[in-house]
Structure formats: structure tokens, C-alpha cells
Image (tube, rainbow, N blue to C red):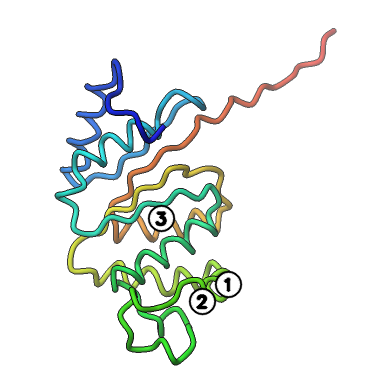
């Protein structure tokens, strides 16, 4: 799917998404599974990526995995420090790109969502430019996870895709 160079019939939608991203607005593409939301998002990001100083791309489908990946990319961008992520002292003071992620990933993965958020939110707030966080699948969230994401919305521009939920059908018993 990464080999797609154009989206037949989606040029106007991609242009609309690009315009909203350039305005600094949050964008959530909602639709049925398999209709090309992710492809539209990728095409839009390809067009604006060179103008975005801090772009974080999340591909994980679970909230916890998204936050762990966000922490990794923010560490690489020097937006969050090893100390803020409670990494071993030998990594404190090192640029994020010099931290061996393979060595620390399991430790970050064991952090609670609350602790990850406690490290991520202040780092986003003090970023020199407003980060853009692109989420390939912003799916079902618990109320607590939703609160964490809402805090991120306050400090970063979020562009995401989300599948449309099927309507709940109420079954009425017959007479």
C-alpha cells in the first residue's frame, strides 16, 4: 500500500485534509474499514511533511503501544529526556538518538499510561514548535485513555484515522 502514488477520485479530499493540517486544526478521518482513510492521511502527510518541524507518526492500533511509540519518537527528537522517562542513569544527559531503544523499550513498555502521559504532556507543551501527531488508527479508548489523548490534543495537532463504529441495533421482541 505504501507504493500508492495517487488516489483516484480522492484528490479533493487529500487537498481538504492538507488545508486543514496547514491551518493547524485537528483532523480525524472517519469511515468504514477498507475505504482508504490511511492512504488519504499518508498522501496528505506526504504533501505537508516538509513544512512540519515536529512530526510523530504512530502506527500501533492500541493506545498503550501508541504512547510507547510516541515516547520513542519524542526521545529521538529530544522532546523528552531519558530522565523524564525514568530510564537508567547511564542514559541521562545523552541526546535521545544515542539512547539504545532496544535496551530500554521493555522498561518504557512497563510504564503505566499515567506515567507515560506525565512524561509526554509537559514535553509536548514546551516543544519549540507545535508537534503534529499522525495516528493511523485511533480506535476504541477507555475513558482514562481518552482523557490522556484529550490532554495531548491541548498541546499537539492530532491528525488521525478512525473506523466508523457500527450502529448498535436494538432488538425488539415480537408480539
Disc 2 + disc 3, Cβ < 8 Å = no
Q: Residue at x 50, y 50 (%)?
A: 60
Q: CA distance from mark 2 to mark 1?
A: 6 Å
Q: Earlier in the sequence, mark 2 or mark 3?
A: 2
Q: Earlier in the sequence, mark 3 or mark 1?
A: 1
In the rendered image, the quadrant that contains the C terminus is top right
Q: Residue at x 33, y 88 (%)?
A: 93
Q: Which type of secondary structure does the marked residue at label 3 adopt? A: helix
Q: Which mark identifies residue 106?
A: 1
**Residue located farthest toward the bottom when viewing the structure as drawn:** 89
Disc 2 + disc 1, Cβ < 8 Å = yes
Q: CA distance from mark 2 to mark 3?
A: 27 Å
Q: Which type of secondary structure does the marked residue at label 2 adopt? A: helix
Circle 2 residue: 104
Choose top left, top right, bottom left or bottom right for residue 81: bottom left
Q: Which type of secondary structure does the marked residue at label 1 adopt? A: helix
Q: In the rendered view, tell whether residue 37 sits above or below residue 56.
A: above
In the rendered image, the quadrant that contains the N terminus is top left
Amino acid at each position: 500500500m505504501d507504493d500508492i502514488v495517487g488516489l483516484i477520485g480522492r484528490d479533493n479530499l487529500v487537498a481538504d485534509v492538507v488545508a486543514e493540517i496547514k491551518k493547524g486544526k485537528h483532523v480525524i478521518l472517519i469511515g468504514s474499514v477498507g475505504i482508504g482513510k490511511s492512504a488519504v492521511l499518508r498522501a496528505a502527510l506526504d504533501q505537508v511533511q516538509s513544512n512540519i518541524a515536529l512530526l510523530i507518526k504512530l502506527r500501533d492500533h492500541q493506545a498503550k503501544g501508541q504512547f510507547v511509540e510516541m515516547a520513542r519518537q519524542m526521545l529521538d527528537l529530544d522532546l523528552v529526556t531519558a530522565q523524564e522517562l525514568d530510564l537508567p542513569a547511564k542514559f541521562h544527559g545523552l541526546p535521545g538518538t544515542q539512547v539504545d531503544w532496544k535496551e530500554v523499550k521493555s522498561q518504557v513498555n512497563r510504564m503505566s499510561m499515567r506515567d507515560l502521559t506525565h512524561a509526554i504532556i509537559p514535553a509536548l507543551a514546551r516543544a519549540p514548535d507545535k508537534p503534529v501527531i499522525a495516528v493511523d488508527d485511533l480506535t476504541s479508548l477507555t475513558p482514562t485513555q481518552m482523557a490522556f489523548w484529550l490532554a495531548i490534543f491541548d498541546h499537539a495537532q492530532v491528525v488521525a484515522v478512525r473506523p466508523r463504529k457500527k450502529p448498535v441495533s436494538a432488538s425488539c421482541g415480537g408480539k
